[in-house]
Image: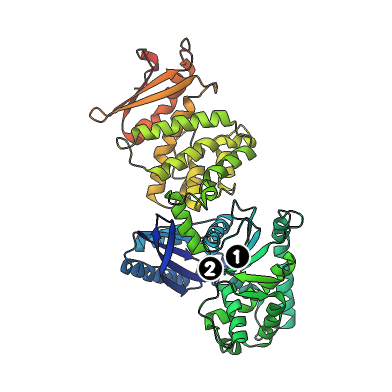
Amino acid sequence: MQTVAAIDVGTNSIHMVVVKVNPEIPAFNIIDTEKSTVRLGEGSKDTGRLHPDAIARAIAALRRCQEVAKACKVEQIQAVATSAVREAGNGRAFIRAVEAELGLKVNVISGPEEARRIYLGVLSGIEFSEQPHIIIDIGGGSTELILGNGQDPRSLSSTKVGAVRLTEEFITTDPVSKSEFEQLQAYVRGMLEWPVEELRSQLSPGEIPTLIGTSGTIESIVKLHACDVMGACPTSLHGHVLTLIDLRELIQNLRKCTYAERCKIPGMTERRAEIILAGAVILAETMALLRLEAITTCERALREGIVVDWMLKQGLIEDRLRYQGSIRERSVMHLAHQYHVELATAERIAGFTVALFDQTQGSLHNWGVDERHLLWAAAILHNCGHYISHSAHHKHSYYLIRHGGLLGYTDAEVEIIANLARYHRKGPPKKKHENYQNLVNKTQRQIVDQLSAMLKMAVALDRRQIGAIQSLQCDVDTTSQSVTLQLQAHQADDDCALELWSLDIKKACFEVEFGVTLVAQLADQAPSPDLQLA
């Protein structure tokens, strides 16, 4: 049994769930939770930056999470940040501050990746039976919509409509005026129309999906209804059903209330009372656009999805979610196909790159399985920039990978993959490069520095793109700080002169990064003086 904590740094709140993972089943049990309403995104509408007070509240909340995790003897903490941090101009500075003060690594994830992990969380709590389900998660800064039947999601979207965001942008009166309410409704409908239509286009004729609602805003809305109907607030909302008719009645009641009156409603907290109306409008307009009359709540969402994603990456899940486990590889190959990457060449270079990584692990570097995968992904996609232009294609590759919507990765991991591809040719990374500055810490920069040097070598080994080099053997002598690269030619009569020449040009970064002298030669041949990489 392993004890793992998952932290969701959201626009409105910071949530943590602590679970015990049983790898034999595999499953997990929740043993503790922690929540703080810090309003990290508060006030960022005008400045585009996280406010210092909000940052201080968030860091204090994360410190409390660490204390709870320590008391629970947590072995792994997986933390992600969503809408507020990924949109803020000082979001990366916040991530650095958290790491510096607390030693806690927080990974920023994209909107689609947030949606995918919500999907994983819901799948861990509900049996889909291969039937279509639509999941809606309304957060403080964004709303995620997912369509799936238990296999790969058919549709993932994240739209910038959230309960905190819309409250700040549209509601100034108390109780809300008719004009502000109508503007809020119209804006929500306009923003969600396209993602809903895209999702509906993925439904087959005759399919009637089940609508599932997750997270704090929807839980609070359903709780208000449940408290009213049952006369007492239930301890669990999992599986509770709310109809669109009842939701619209609830919205009309909330419209008439002042903030003070909303605070007195059974089941309402003061902080939730500020934003509940905007959240309820988002839910009602989405249900109307989807043409669905009821929603069922699920108490598992992003935090549990973070745990499931971790379990998948650790190889702890092999049955029910097996298809989800290969999402990263399939996402990379999908992007390669989208940008017309020559896969035979890309896979050859990826093979060389991974071979260099594996054969120097422990002697020249101590990177692990995660870094190995990022290097593989960069090798597959390094030439995708040709889709735009051959000229400066390495820079185009960076842009396409960075904005390509890769699933299964954190924002930092996508940044590393994109930077590795960016530096597969020409000079080493430089501090003045904007893309290099996007790497948030020294470790990430070192990964790019060292692994991009390996990728350069691998690209050189396929200079003619005909598979001239069949295999390589890398021998490291740590005493003399030298590396011998034995290359096996595919054709016995091919001297691979162009590959050796290209390698001679590209070897400098590798030698500098690892402090070695490198010599390359074809197998069963003595190294030629002009082609020695020394």
* Residue beneath the point at 74% across and 71% down: 186
Q: Quadrant of the N terminus?
A: bottom left
Left or right relative to 395: residue 251: right
Q: What amino acid is found at the position of numbered circle 2 in the picture? A: Thr
**Image quadrant where residue 127 sits:** bottom right
**Image quadrant where residue 390 sits:** top right
Neighbor class of circle 1 (other Cα within 10 Å; few <14, some 14-19, many 20+) is many
Neighbor class of circle 2 (other Cα within 10 Å; few <14, some 14-19, many 20+) is many
Q: Is residue 528 above or below residue 355?
A: above
Percent across and percent down for residue 258 are 63, 88
Mark 1 or mark 2, which is nearer the start of the sequence? 2
For residue 123, the mark is none
Left or right relative to 493: residue 183: right
| Marks 2 and 1 in Cβ contact (< 8 Å) | yes
Percent across and percent down for residue 475 are 32, 26
Q: Which residue is label 2 attached to?
A: 11
Q: Which residue is label 1 attached to?
A: 142
Percent across and percent down for residue 18 are 40, 66
Give SS at disc 2.
loop
Q: Quadrant of the C terminus?
A: top left
Left or right relative to 87: residue 34: left
Regarding residue 509, the answer to whether it shows in the image is no
Q: What amino acid is found at the position of numbered circle 1 in the picture? A: Ser
Is 130 or 4 nearer to us in this picture?
130
Is 411 or 212 nearer to us in this picture?
212
* Residue beneath the point at 51% across and 23% down: 463
Q: Is residue 480 above or below residue 116?
A: above
Q: For the residues marked 2 and 1, what is the alpha-carbon distance in whole angstroms?
A: 9 Å
Percent across and percent down for residue 191 are 70, 64
What colouring style does the render use?
A: rainbow
Give SS at disc 1.
loop
